[in-house]
Amino acid sequence: MFRIHGHGPTVSMLEHSLNGGHLHHAYLLVGPEHVGKTTLAVQLAQAVNCTGENPPCLECNACLRIAHAQHADVLTLEVNPGQESEGRKSIGIDTIRELQHSASLRPYEGRKRVYIIQDAERMSLEAANALLKTLEEPPPDVMLIVLTSDIDSLLPTVISRCMQLELRPLPVPEVTQLLQDEYNVAAPEAEQFARLSRGCVGWAIQAVQDPEPAAALHQRLERIASVCEGDLDHRFSYADDLARRFQRDRAAGREELYLWLRWWRDVLLILQGQTEQVIHVTWQETLERLASNVSPAEVVRWIHVITGTLDALDQNANARLALEVMMLELPGVQVARARA
Ligand SMILES: [Zn+2]
């Protein structure tokens, strides 16, 4: 039995295919980070190789070995953070060729060889085309599970060869309840983590078990708050740091801009009196101060500036220049200048 938080209809459908013996040879799991894609992929790999009852039993030798990445027939291809440099895709043709070679062999210890491809949007064009061949003519006893948080960056031909399953974030109250019931988190804290997770339950669970990600997020927000209320020098030095981060790790750089979007979405919600939907509840005071200096129209315009910057960066604009221009548009700058 699959054991996963949320995604009921998707799991039922997979169980139905599993019991009926008509699983697809390739699945594409689409959804934001920490929503449960990896958990589902691993349990699917366990399900097809499980030797217990009611697969995936999660307890038999095969299930345990797969959970600990020790099963010879289940391989996860993943990109280490920082491995990607600007403009370069980090899952190359060699990786996919190795996959193709091992996929042509019979399963070694299990029933099916399963390949889990993490962050598939990072495949180079060559790699994606090579993978396409495997998807078009899959060897017997092979299952491919392709994971992405950015389906627009995949080749349409790759998408069309896979059975697509979309994993959506869970409702925040559901995550709050889960943290209270299964992780003994007190109500206010549970709600705070649930909101910060934006329904991506994996993030929330990680945050209650390990304070590090929440602390890191707090630090990033602290910097954003100080940039919003700081002078131009402050903004440019931030733009410089962020440009460097983009060059080191594109995904992390993009994530920082998404954080800006969520932060200003909160400001907009406050301006509209919808405080119950604010994500960064612990920053309410700062957000309210920012809201008191801007109009909703200015915030909307600024949000468009951020998304425009993300687009420009995707098209390989000069990161430093694009981010400096963005920082010049930050609303409330006159206020900050007057104070500075
Ligand atoms: Zn099992």
Image (cartoon, rainbow, N blue to C red):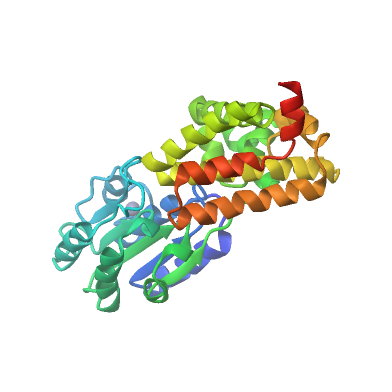
Quarter that holds the N terminus: bottom left
Rendered location of residue 234, percent (x, y): 59, 26
Give whichever of 39, 122 is nearer the camera. 122
Residue at position x 67%, y 49% in the image: 303
Rendered location of residue 325, percent (x, y): 58, 44
Please say whether residue 53 is visible from this viewpoint.
Answer: no
Quarter that holds the C terminus: top right
Instruction: Judge left or right: residue 206 versus residue 234.
Output: left
Count of marks overlaid on the render? 0
Rendered location of residue 176, percent (x, y): 66, 40
Q: Is the residue 327 above or below the residue 76 in the image?
A: above
Residue 268, quarter of the rendered image? top right
Q: Is the residue 82 above or below the residue 15 in the image?
A: above
Please say whether residue 26 is visible from this viewpoint.
Answer: yes
Furthest residue to the top? 340
Residue at position x 43%, y 63% in the image: 153
Rendered location of residue 277, percent (x, y): 76, 44
